[in-house]
Image (cartoon, rainbow, N blue to C red):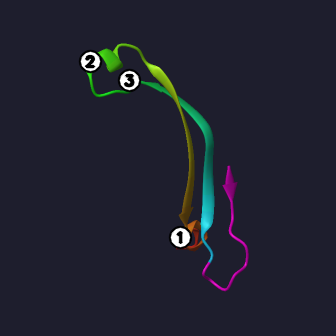
Amino acid sequence: MWTAGATCGGACMDKIHIRDLQVRCVVGIYPEERTAKQDVIINVTLHADYIGRAHV
């Protein structure tokens, strides 16, 4: 999902939200922990000025 920042005098940051990304991976340090893959759910919000870069 992409949302543009609000009007705020050039100090805005755009946001990219990644929600509920499910990844199956091996988690653990010791061999007995790494025997089966586990589901990991990731939520991330990235902040950057993408609008300013789009007009280059």
The question of residue 7 being in magenta is answered with yes
Q: Amino acid at mark 3?
A: Val
The question of residue 25 being in magenta is answered with no
Q: Earlier in the sequence, mark 3 or mark 2?
A: 3
Gap between marks 2 and 1 measured at Cα: 46 Å
Gap between marks 3 and 2 measured at Cα: 10 Å
Identity of the residue drawn at 56% across and 70% down? 49
Q: Is residue 32 left or right of residue 12?
A: left
Identity of the residue drawn at 26% across and 18% down? 31
Stretch of the chain drawn in magenta: 1-11
Seen from the viewer's position, the closer of residues 55 and 1 is: 1
Q: Residues within 10 Å of mark 2 (few under 14, many from 20)?
A: few
Q: Amino acid at mark 2?
A: Pro
Residue that protrudes farthest toward the right in the picture:
7
Q: Please, is residue 34 above or below residue 1 in the view?
A: above
Q: Main secondary structure of the magenta part?
A: loop
Q: Is residue 19 left or right of residue 24?
A: right
Identity of the residue drawn at 68% across and 69% down? 5
Q: Which marked residue is nearer to the observer: mark 2 or mark 1?
A: 2
Find residue 26 and name its label.
3
Q: Is residue 24 left or right of residue 12?
A: left
Regarding mark 2 in the picture, which secondary structure is present there? helix
Q: Which marked residue is nearer to the observer: mark 3 or mark 2?
A: 2
Residue that label 1 marks: 53
Find residue 31 and name its label.
2
Q: Which marked residue is nearer to the observer: mark 3 or mark 1?
A: 3
Seen from the viewer's position, the closer of residues 48 and 37 is: 37
Total labels: the figure holds 3
